[in-house]
Image: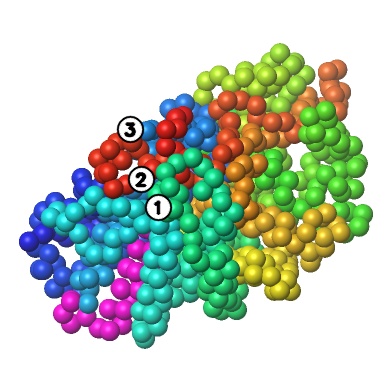
């Protein structure tokens, strides 16, 4: 009889195994004995809550894959440097070679979910409410485990029973349509179970509303896949007829858009958008928000190790703060800086025109006119003026909750010692960043030739979300884990998913407009006006979704771009096929390397003083190259070693006889 390790499960540590489909060896406690206790059943299911989608973590890894962010250039830590992923460097022999992709671990978790589904109904003395709550969670998690795998491989074997070492594990992949249908069926089973519970689940546990939003999330992806299949996106790739057939759909895109619409609408009106957007990320009680559907909470005693703010800074002396003569601490954080917001993301946050009161792109406002904002020969924005910081004033509220920029304050503490300055002293071009406030660590600005390890932002921005910090009396920071949460599901997604499905179904434009305006209004914006911003409702929806979820831990933007472009049948995704940009602010500084003086702007009386100017520049360096010019990149290839060991598996379309580099 198979045995389970109770201590490992109670500690919420996922079981490990050597079989690629998660078949486990014998451990310590007889299985029948384990499932005789209802309390241990809860402990078993609790282990699923330690899981998070692959690439979605405190390092904002999936944001680095998108055009929202660029990562640290550290050559030794792919956590912060997205080169191998963006350059599509796959390991054809030993798996993904990129990140912790969920193949073996995914099937291990699926097997555990299968076990829970099979065995929990047999637990003696378990109440009906406990039974259905645990089963509902188990079905929902199995759906999420499969959804996570579908993101990267598309076609995977579907296993809905607890396999043993005696079962045949050399299985064929199911079609992509079958995978989606299985995920949606599991969400339906979860909803059926939750409908039979008589008690509201504890805060932080899965519930029916969370499942509805998760269901809408998968249905939107399935709809895009069905649309792409109808346009021949994968059938036009080189490859076997068998592999391409696994990407075909019998159901229409509208079939799945209807599912997405109805699932999201089931949650509509049950929650409210948090009045202050910033409170969703930087307040310790945010898990109690009116917007919270499924919060994931962290503190010292309950799930530590979640500190995205630990990466939202440079390292060393005087590189975070503008600096004062009486305060010059070393930034002692052991975590290295990580993901930096791009100018492309910053450009998405509207600014209120001081002359008209209209909300528009910042470079169109009266403020921009006073800064002589124009475009250079590379079609990049440039400008000049003593008041260059005006380009960051009167922005969408979400800008200040998401982006740390030149002139803002760390963690919102308006004290000179925490002032952020990212300008560059350019009075000596051959030294360029040597005396800059933060030091971008370029060897020189002219070529952006990077040498060494980046210790500061390369775009002039840092992420602001989750930067809860406790300052000591001496001005330094207490690095103890803060009580903070992120949302696996929040109400804004229910609204946005409903709007997207409604738009795609057609005939529901008023619903889409109403939801877009709800999102805009919460951010302090007026109602959408196409004549002011210069694009249609669909483009506005995509922009609002981008800024609404930017730099949240369950990464959104990268997979949104995949979904929207797949639905269009695009083989090239423009946003993922070029390098991102940063804002370079040039001014005259005090030329001193002494702590407490470095980074100070020079007075106008300085003989070398010049009027500050700025320009948007492409981060033109191989470490930040992005490539998405072929439909094969929608899915990862299966390693050749897997295909050789399991002759029943087929390669994803386009990857047969193709270099993995």
Residue drawn at x 56%, y 54% is 228
> Residue 180's spot in the image, x, y percent?
44, 62
Residue that carries the numbered disc 2 in the rendered image: 650
Nearest to viewer (mark 3 / mark 1): 1
Q: CA distance from mark 2 to mark 3?
A: 15 Å
Magenta stretch contains residue 143 = yes
Label located before the other in sequence (3 or 1): 3
Q: Position of residue 624 (x, y in %)?
A: 58, 31
Q: Secondary structure at mark 2?
A: loop
Nearer the observer, 589 or 144: 144
Please provide percent x and percent y for residue 478. 47, 45
SS of the residue at dot 1? Answer: loop
- Between residues 285 and 543, which one lies in front from this camera angle? 543
Q: Quadrant of residue 132?
A: bottom left
**Label 1 Cα neighbours within 10 Å, binned few <14 / some 14-19 / many ≥20:** many
Give the spatial CA distance, label 1 vs label 2.
Answer: 9 Å
Residue 659: quarter of image: top left
Task: Provide the residue designation for mark 3.
Answer: 93
Region in magenta: 122-150
Question: What residue is drawn where x is 25% and y is 61%?
Answer: 112
Q: Which residue is mark 1?
A: 155
> Residue sitting at 18 percent across and 82 percent down?
125
In terms of depth relative to the viewer, which is nearer, 140 or 337? 140
Judged by its main secondary structure, the magenta piece is helix
Instruction: Determine whether label 3 and label 1 are within 8 Å by CB.
Output: no
């Amino acid at each position: 009889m198979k045995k389970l390790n109770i201590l490992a499960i109670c500690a919420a540590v996922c079981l490990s195994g050597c079989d690629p489909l998660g078949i486990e060896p014998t451990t310590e406690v007889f299985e029948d004995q384990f499932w005789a206790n209802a309390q241990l059943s809860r402990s078993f299911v609790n282990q699923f809550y330690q899981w998070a989608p692959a690439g979605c973590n405190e390092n904002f890894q999936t944001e680095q894959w998108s055009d929202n962010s660029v990562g640290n250039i550290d050559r030794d830590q792919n956590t912060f440097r997205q080169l191998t992923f963006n350059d599509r460097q796959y390991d054809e022999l030993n798996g993904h070679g990129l990140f912790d992709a969920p193949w073996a671990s995914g099937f291990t978790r699926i097997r555990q979910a299968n076990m829970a589904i099979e065995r929990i109904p047999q637990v003696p003395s378990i109440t009906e409410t406990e039974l259905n709550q645990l089963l509902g969670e188990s079905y929902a998690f199995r759906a999420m485990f499969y959804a996570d795998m579908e993101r990267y491989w598309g076609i995977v074997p579907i296993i809905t029973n607890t396999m043993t070492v005696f079962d045949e594990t050399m299985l064929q992949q199911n079609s992509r349509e079958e995978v989606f249908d299985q995920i949606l069926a599991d969400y339906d089973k979860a909803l059926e179970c939750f409908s039979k519970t008589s008690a509201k689940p504890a805060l932080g546990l899965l519930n029916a509303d969370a499942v509805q939003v998760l269901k809408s999330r998968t249905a939107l992806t399935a709809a895009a896949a069905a649309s792409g299949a109808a346009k021949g996106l994968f059938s036009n790739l080189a490859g076997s007829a068998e592999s391409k057939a696994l990407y075909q759909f019998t159901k229409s895109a509208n079939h799945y858009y209807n599912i997405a619409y109805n699932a999201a609408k089931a949650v509509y009106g049950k929650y409210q958008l948090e009045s202050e957007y910033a409170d969703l990320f930087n307040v310790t009680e945010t898990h109690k928000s009116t917007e919270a559907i499924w919060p994931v909470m962290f503190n010292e005693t309950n799930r530590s190790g979640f500190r995205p703010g630990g990466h939202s800074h440079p390292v060393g002396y005087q590189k975070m703060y503008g600096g004062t003569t009486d305060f010059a601490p070393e930034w002692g954080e052991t975590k290295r800086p990580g993901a930096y917001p791009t100018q492309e993301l910053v450009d998405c946050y509207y600014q209120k025109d001081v002359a008209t009161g209209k909300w528009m792109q910042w470079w169109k406002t009266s403020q921009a006119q006073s800064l002589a904002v124009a475009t250079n020969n590379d079609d990049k924005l440039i400008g000049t003026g003593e008041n260059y910081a005006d380009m960051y004033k009167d922005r969408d509220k979400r800008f200040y909750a998401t982006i740390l920029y030149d002139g803002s304050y760390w963690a919102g503490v308006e004290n000179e010692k925490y002032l952020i300055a990212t300008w560059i002293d350019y009075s000596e071009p051959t030294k360029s960043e040597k005396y800059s406030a933060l030091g971008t660590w370029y060897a020189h600005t002219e070529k952006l030739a990077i040498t060494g390890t980046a210790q500061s932002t390369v775009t002039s921005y840092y992420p602001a979300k989750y930067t809860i910090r406790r300052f000591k009396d001496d001005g330094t920071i207490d690095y103890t884990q803060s009580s903070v949460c992120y949302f696996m599901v929040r109400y804004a997604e229910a609204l946005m998913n409903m709007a997207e499905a409604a738009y795609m179904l057609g005939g529901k434009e008023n619903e889409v407009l109403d939801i877009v305006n709800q999102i805009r209004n919460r951010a302090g914006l007026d109602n959408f006006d196409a004549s002011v911003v210069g694009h249609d409702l669909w483009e506005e929806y995509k922009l609002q979704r981008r800024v609404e979820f930017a730099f949240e831990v369950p990464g959104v933007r990268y997979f949104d771009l995949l979904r929207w472009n797949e639905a269009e049948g695009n083989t090239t995704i423009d946003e993922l096929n070029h390098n991102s940009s940063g804002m370079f602010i040039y001014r005259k500084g005090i030329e001193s390397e002494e702590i407490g003086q470095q980074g100070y702007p020079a007075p106008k009386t300085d003989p070398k003083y010049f009027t500050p100017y700025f320009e948007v520049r492409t981060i033109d360096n191989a470490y930040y190259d992005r490539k998405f010019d072929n439909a094969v990149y929608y899915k990862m290839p299966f390693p050749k070693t897997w295909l050789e060991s399991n002759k029943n598996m087929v390669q994803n379309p386009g990857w047969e006889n193709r270099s993995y580099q």
